[in-house]
Amino acid sequence: MTQILTLIIGIILIIALLWWFFGKHETTTGQSQIKNGSQESTVVVKGGYSPQTVILKKGVPAKIKFDMQDSTACLSHVVFDSLGVNKDLTKQRYTEVNIPTDKAGEINYACGMDMFHGKVVVK
């Protein structure tokens, strides 16, 4: 009986891991708000990034505020490889990152361990 129970638990764990790494997960998208000639968007950091995708308008100066609500070591940093940005989010509740909007495209970002991802789309 113990062997059967162990086998069932093992199969359930394998299925859960496969779903976590290879399953299609729902993503959230947010729009920036334009005020006084610049745009700003807030990304909540709590078990990941919400929204995971931020849409910005091309040609309007932009910044993203990361609202740190998680004490997980993995999420303590946000890294924009293509911009050369690596910010520590634990120093204050809100951390701002300026985003270049001079050309359309996608800018990817991730946590310090590259486990959680997000992107900025400039249209």
Image (cartoon, rainbow, N blue to C red):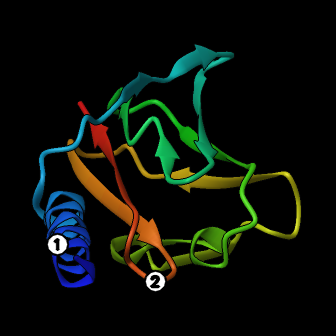
**Percent position of residue 20, x then y:** 24, 60
Q: Residue at x 11, y 62 (%)?
A: 22
Counting other residues with Cα less than 10 Å from the Cα at mark 1, is it few (<14), some (14-19), or many (20 or more)?
A: few
Q: Quadrant of the C terminus?
A: top left
- Above or below for 68 versus 44: below
Name which residue lies at 32% across and 32% down: 58
Going 56% across and 53% down the picture, which residue do you hit?
Answer: 47
- The disc at residue 113 is 2
Callout 1, which amino acid?
Ile
Q: Residues within 10 Å of mark 2 (few under 14, many from 20)?
A: few
Q: Amino acid at mark 2?
A: Met
- Which quadrant: the N terminus? bottom left
The residue at which mark 1 appears reads as 14
User: Which of 104 and 54 lies nearest the eye of the viewer?
Assistant: 54
Q: Counting residues from the N terminus, which is met first, the one under dot 1 or under dot 2? A: 1
Asked which secondary structure carries label 2, the reply is: loop
Mark 1 secondary-structure assignment: helix
Give percent across and percent down for residue 116: 40, 64
Report x, y in % for residue 101. Answer: 38, 43
How many discs appear?
Answer: 2
> Looking at this view, is 48 or 36 the one in front?
48
- In the rendered view, does 117 fall on the left or right side of 47? left
Mark 1 or mark 2, whichever is nearer to me:
1
Mark identifier at residue 63:
none
Q: Residue at x 81, y 69 (%)?
A: 90
